[in-house]
Image (cartoon, grey):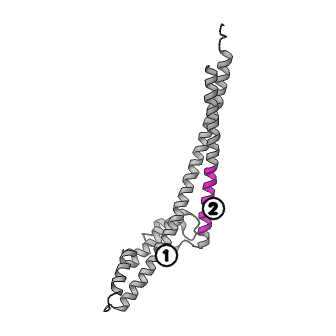
Amino acid sequence: MRSTLDKLISYFGLALAGLLVIGGGLLLWGANFTNSNVTEQLKQQDITMPAGPAIEDPLIKPYLEKYAGQEMTTGDQAKAFAEHYIKVHMDKSSGGRTYEDVSGEFIKLSKDANADQTKVAELGALRQSLFMGNTLRGLLLNAYAFGTMAKIMTYAAIAAFVGAAGMALLGLLGLQHAKKVATSAPARAA
């Protein structure tokens, strides 16, 4: 009876190890697929990370210095560029106002017949610039999100493979133990 239970538990462990290997393989495939798509999409944008005087601002330099002059190909680079280059310039040009703030001001001012047309044109240009900046930031932050998912899938795959190795070892040890129990069990009298 003990030998049968050991075998049953051991085979279950080996089956679980097999499932973990399959799951780890799928996770690695997903991570590689996601990473290659992020890299491919970013390469198509042909963005070179700023360097030199363009990153001397203390709000920019600590985040972009390690990427200075590189071609943008990773989600981490995309996040740094979006949050610490584009956003900093957007905030400076708008005085910290959001696209929604500037757009509201533009709409209100453009409806005023007595408004200074130079001011309306300036607000319109700022509104357009903030819209484009927000759009690019959103796209780059999506690349960062997918790059982060790829990292998580990679770590999960590693954990699955380690778990599979552990379960396979335990399963094999269990089968070995079942063999010992079966050979050392006393014969039962009828």
Q: Main secondary structure of the magenta part?
A: helix
Depicted 81 relative to depicted 121: above or below: above
Q: Quadrant of residue 40?
A: bottom right
Is residue 76 in the magenta section?
no
Q: Is any part of residue 65 visible from this angle? A: no
Amino acid of disc 1: Ala
Q: Residue at x 57, y 72 (%)?
A: 48
- What residue is pinned by disc 2? 36
Q: Residue at x 65, y 10 (%)?
A: 188
Q: Nearer the viewer, residue 129 or 19?
A: 19
Q: Residue at x 48, y 73 (%)?
A: 135
Disc number lying in front (1 or 2): 2
Depicted 161 relative to depicted 113: above or below: above
Estimate the x, y position of residue 141 in percent, counting from the top left.
Answer: 50, 65
Q: How many angstroms separate mark 1 from mark 2 (CA)? A: 29 Å
**Quarter in which the C terminus is drawn:** top right
Q: Residue furthest front?
A: 190
Q: Nearer the viewer, residue 86 or 7?
A: 7
